[in-house]
Amino acid sequence: MMINVIAHELNLRVYSPLWRKNQVNYLRDLYNHGFRFVLTSISTMGISPPRLLGKVLTLNDIEELISAALKYGFNPALEGGEGGRHSLLMHRYLGRE
């Protein structure tokens, strides 16, 4: 990765915990750990805007998003600018399990 080469040349360390992670597992793990999301924007083909835009995503919605990502070739966690999401609820950070 080019950023690592540049950082090395500048004697800097790069911390990028999401790079090289399986984005499908990452998205499922977030949901399973209590994170809830609203899809706030769509910038790629394959996501059904009328149904998912502005909705708190359920696990079924996430699986649909993953299927569309595999079919159309976008990042299922939307980390490449394919869409936007907003985190609503994180149980662990609110002291609930």
Image (cartoon, rainbow, N blue to C red):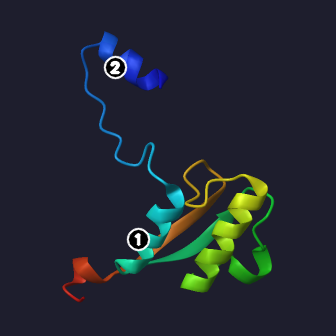
Q: Is residue 44 left or right of residue 4?
A: right
Nearer the observer, 40 or 19:
19
Where disc 2 sits, the SS reads: helix
Is the C terminus in the top left, top right, bottom left or bottom right quadrant? bottom left
Where disc 1 sits, the SS reads: helix
Residue 93: quadrant of the picture: bottom left
Q: Is residue 66 left or right of residue 77?
A: right
Q: Is any atom of residue 96 visible in this view?
A: yes
Please name the residue that numbered disc 1 is placed on: 30
Q: From the viewer's perspective, is the residue at label 1 or at label 2 nearer?
A: 1
Q: Is residue 71 above or below residue 54?
A: above
Furthest-left residue in this view: 95
Amino acid carrying mark 1 in the image:
Leu
- Residue located 59% across and 62% down the image: 84
Amino acid carrying mark 2 in the image:
Ala
Please name the residue that numbered disc 2 is placed on: 7
- Residue located 29% across and 13% down the image: 10
Q: Is residue 5 left or right of residue 58?
A: left
- Residue located 68% across and 53% down the image: 74
Nearer the observer, 20 or 88:
20
Mark 1 to mark 2 CA distance (whole Å): 29 Å
